[in-house]
Image: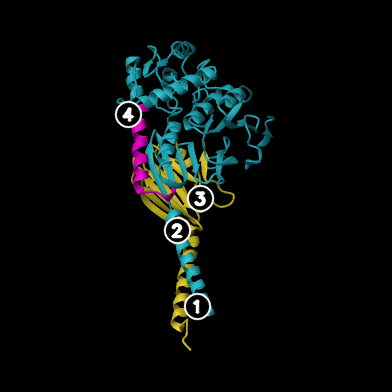
Chain colours: A yellow, B cyan
Amino acid sequence: MKMLIKPLDLVLIAALLLAGGGLWLARSRAQAGVTAVVLVGGEEVRRIDLTKVEAPYEIELNTTPAVTLTVEPGAVSVSKAACRDKLCVKAGRLTKANDSAVCLPARVTVRLIGKTDPGGVDAAVY
Amino acid sequence: MKKKLLFAALALLLAAVVGLIGYDALTGRTQTTDFFAMDTTVSVRLTGCVKPETAEQIKAMVRHLDTDLLSRTSEGSEIAAVNRAHGGTVGEQTAAWLQTLKELEEISGHAFTADLGALTGLWGIGTENERVPDRDEIQAALAHTKKWSINGRTVTVENGAALDLGAVGKGIACDEINAIVRQTKAKKVIAAVGGSVLLYAKNPKETFRVGIRDPRGEANDYAAVLTVGSCCISTSGSYERVFTAPDGKTYHHIFDPSNGFPAQSGLLSVTVLCDSGLLSDALSTACFVLGCEKSEELLKAYDAKAVFITEENKIITAGDLAGRLEITADQYTLVEESQ
């Protein structure tokens, strides 16, 4: 009797299903956790996966006025800024998706991206 | 035969899975663009099959609005030219915005006033020249306000007054972004021009969670979270751009056009939602000046909804927001307005 499905077909089907499942898993995994995006003048200069940070460290941004970021496991903050109002420093530690800190004089934006958790927000008004 | 069917079914299933993943990867993709314009940060998130050029188009459009049309400080703008010459002809777009504002001024009893430029310049809050002017100076600055007019595309502004669209420029930008994205295949758009936000979802059932800044908290703290569909939403608050005078008193930047001082209406902030960004911006400013009770009629006239946060830590809603507001900071209590 002629076999309709050859063993090789089964292998192919299994491989394709696995690949599909893997892709799906990778997509959902990629959305978990938060990533900090640092922009200067609207251009992205750094992208830091905050789930992979093990020890706190600082980043000096070469802007005028100067801005220093502190990166910690799961959080980022503007720790020092030479601007007048220090609104960016007052923004505190950013920990949730869509949290942001902006230094207008230095044109620095720090924004957390990632999947919005159930208690999180899509946008903020102020 | 059975095996053939099984094989076909399996192949179909596989095609469907691969197709769905592909479709989702294509249409579920979100592009984020950040840039600076209008003295603030603009962030646009576009979800769906949207060309990268759309983001560039939005960026160019917002910069054009700022530099060529609305900015008081950009020499080449239409508003700056009108202020210099105490009048003149503006383009169709600017004329339409000014007409909308003139009408709102009248309906709000001048709680919103577009020609407060001389007064805001006098106080200079947020600039290096911030100070508390004396009463004579304030009276002199007020003497020429509420007197601008528009007829067709012809604008007149009194000598000694200046148009200042700083309170509504961000909302206008939201409206123009809205016009651009509606012509694309965007499924979902979240655009924040400073604190003015445009929310758009192709699916009318889709909702967004919007955090209303806690006036007593830090920049990323929310007093409440609103669940809303497509709309424009803006907040005016006394915590933004404040100036502490040498005498220790704190002054904010939303002026009461009736006396020339920062408005004191018992509010910490007002958030307004409606279909237009220009209106949500202008209404939030007017409502902040009017206070909670006097705002009711104005909001009804524009079919807008609002959330007031009072100095007594009450959160009061206006318009139908039943069940759509969740208080997230303990110190506030919710008072649903009886409608």
Residue under numbered circle 1: B4
The overriding secondary structure of the stretch rendered in magenta is helix
The chain containing the residue under callout 3 comes to: A
Q: What element carries label 3?
A: loop
Q: Can residue A110 be seen in this view?
A: no
Q: Residue A97 carries which label?
A: 3
Density class for disc 1 (Cα within 10 Å; few <14, some 14-19, many ≥20) is: few
Q: Do labels 2 and 3 share a chain?
A: no
Q: How far apart are marks 2 and 4 (CA)?
A: 40 Å
Q: Is residue A6 visible?
A: yes
Name the residue located 47 percent from the left edge and 85 percent from the top edge. Answer: A3
Q: Nearer the viewer, mark 3 or mark 4?
A: 4
User: Few, some or many C-alpha atoms within 10 Å of disc 3 (few <14, some 14-19, many ≥20)?
Assistant: many
**Reading the chain from its start, which is encountered first: label 2 or label 1?**
1
A120 to the left or right of B93 = right
Of all chains, the one bearing label 1 is: B
The stretch in magenta equals B46-70
